[in-house]
Amino acid sequence: MDPRALTFTAHLAPDPECTVVVADLPDRADDGIIELLALAVPAGPDDLRLVFGRPRREAVPIARRLAERLGRTVITTAGHPLLTPGGGLFVGPQQGRGWVRCAPGAPEVWDSSVFPKPLWESVLPAAPRSLGRIVVETVPSGVWLRPAEENRAWQSHWTRLARTMAVSADLITVVIGVPGSDVLPVADVARFWQDLPPVLRPAVRFMCYGPARLNGGRHFGDVLAQGTGEPVRFLSGLPQGTGDGDDVLVVGADGAPGRPLRAGEFVHLPPGYPGPSSSPFAAVHRWPLAGLPQVRPGTHRLDDDVVVEVIRGGLWVRLAQEPEHAVQVRSTDPDPEYERVLCDAGRTEELPRLRRLARQLVRSFPPDLRHSVRLGVCRPTDPSGGGAPAAEAPRSSAASSPARIKEPGATAGRPPASGGLRPAPRPVPTAETRPPTGEHAGHTGLMSVAAEALRRHPGLSGPGPRTGTVAALAAVLRTLAGDDMSDARGGAGNDEGDGRPEQPDDALLREGLRILPVHRGPTGLRATLDASMRRWYAGQLVVTDPTACEASTLGPADAPGNTDFLIWSVNGRRTDLLDPLRPDRVLFLPGSRFRVLPPDPAAPEVVMMRELSSDGTPDDPALDDRAARELIRAWRNWSAHAST
C-alpha cells in the first residue's frame, strides 16, 4: 500500500450515506484484481463510494464491474477529483462528469459534483450560466457570482475558492465578485436570490470576495437586503469549516486568505424590518462574551448603561443609547492584522469610563486573544488632528501650541491653551497600532485600500512611480483614520500608551493630498473656543496651520462646539475617492495659510477665513469681501437645511 494513499484516506470526510472504500490498485486492474477488491469490501446494505488513491481513467468501468459482482450500488468519479478543505472531493465541469452512480443491471447516472453530497446541490446550475451582467459558476462550497466578461485571471480565483472554502452539507456559500474588479450589480445578485427556492434561502451565506462597498459607501449587504426586502446573511471572510461556528479568514486585497476573524457572520435587515436588532448585527461570533448578559444578538451589557457590540472591525464599547453614527461604525472593515476593541467617543466626557471598561473586558480574555487585540477609539469628530487652522494642539504634547504667524503685520500673539479643536462630526474608527512613516506610511491594510482606489481611479496617478503614489495615498488614508490614540499597546496589559504615535511624513502626506481633486468654495467646521481664543483670532491677519486641517462642504452640521469656522477653500482637497462614506470631507494641506476675515455683524460668533494660494497675498479687499459674502450665504443655507 502506498503510504500517500493511507494519508489521503485518513483525511477524507465521512459519508453519511455510503461506505467509503479507498482503493490503491495497480495500473492494470484485471478480473483477478477486481475479485480481490470485492473480497476486501466489508459486507453490508449500504451503497459504496469508491475512491481511488490515484486518479484512474477506468474508474467508472471498475465501479460497474464491482457493482455487478457485489450486487450493490457503487458511486465513483468520472474525472479528476479536487480535494477540498475538510476532506471533500469535487469533480466539476472542468474536471470531468462528476460523481457517477453505478447500480447493478442499470445504466450509470450522474449523482453529484461534490462529496460529501450537499442537500442544496440539485438546485444550482451544473455549468456556468449568465444572469444579467454576471455569471453564476459552481464552486465546491456553492456558487461564485462573477463578472460576465471572460478573463484568464478568473481561473486562478476559482482554484483559490475551490481549495480554501470548506463544503457544508447544509449551508451554501454564495461568493460575490472578484478582487480588484468593479462591484457586481446588486440587481443581478438580487435576481439570483429571488430565483432560489424560498425554502433554500435561509441556508445561503453570502461572502464578498470582491469589493464590499458600493460607490456611495454602503455595504453590499445593506443594499441587497433593501433590494430583496428580506434579511440576508453575509460571512465576514472565507469560511474554513462546514458549520455556522467555524473560522472565517480575512479576505486580502488580492483575495488571499489572512488571519482568522472573531466575527463570523452578520445579518443585514431591510429598512423597516420588525425586530429589536439594528442592522447589521452579528449572528455568529467567537468573542468570549457568554458571561455578559445579552441585550440582543451580538450585543452584551458591560455596565448599567454601557454595552459591547460585535462589529466587523472587532468590538465596539459604547453607551446603551445608540449614537447617530452607529451605521458608519458597524460598517468598519476588519484590520488585516489585529482585532480591535473600539471605544465610542461620541460623548467626550464618557470616553475615560468606556476606555476603563474596555481594558477590563480585554483583561478577561484568554492570553492569546488578549495579546492580539488593539484598543482604539471611534469618534464622531475626526481625530486626524485637523481642527480649526492654527489652533490645533501639537501631536507631541497634550497642550496647545501657538499658531505660526508668518505674515508681516500680523499680531505676534499666541492662542490660549486648549485641548485642540475638532472639525465636523463623522465617525472614524482608529486602531491603536500605527505604521512607520516615510515610504511605508500606512500598514498593509491602508496600502491595499490605496492601491484599490488607484486602480478604480487611474486619474489619481501622480508624476512618480506607482508605488510612490500608493504610499502617498496611504499616508492620506492614515491621516483620515486618525492617530490621536494613546491607549494600551498590545492589549490590556498596559493601561497607558507609550507616548506620541508616529505621524505620516509631511512631505508624503502633501504629495498624497496634491493627487486628490481640488475643492473651490465654502467649507465649515465647528469647535469650542472661549472668549480669549475668539479675541486671539480676531487679532490675527493670517494664521498658518502646520497640520492637515479638515472641514466639510456641508458646513458645521450638528458638530459639538460653540464656534463655527467658515473657510473659503481654493486648494483644499476632496477625499471622497478614498473614503466614499465621507463625500463632504475636505482636507487642507499641512502648512496652509488662511486670511482671517473681518467678522460679520449679523454673525459675530462665526470665524471666517479665506485660504491663500501659494503665491496669494492677504491684502486683497475685493477677494475678502467676495469670500465673506459667499461664506455667510453658505452658512445661512446650511443653518436653514439643518433646521428643517
Image (spheres, helix red, strand yellow):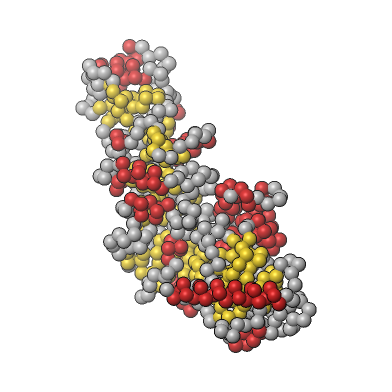
Residue at 39% from the left image edge and 55% from the top image edge: 222
Residue at 60 percent of width and 88 percent of height = 531
Q: Quadrant of the image for the C terminus?
A: bottom left
Q: Is residue 392 left or right of residue 95?
A: right
Nearest the eye: 266 or 195: 195
* Frontmost residue, 192 versus 263: 192
| Residue 311 seen anywhere in this rendered image of the structure | yes
Q: Which residue is drawn at 66% across and 69% down?
A: 547
Q: In this view, does 424 lie above or below 34?
A: below
Q: Residue reaching furthest top? A: 31
Indicate the position of residue 429 as horizontal and vertical percent values: 51, 64
Q: In the image, residue 213 lies at what x, y percent?
A: 47, 53
Answer whether residue 38 is visible to the viewer in this image.
no
| Residue visible at 23% across and 28% down in the picture | 46
Q: Is residue 247 left or right of residue 389?
A: left
- Residue 575: quadrant of the picture: bottom right
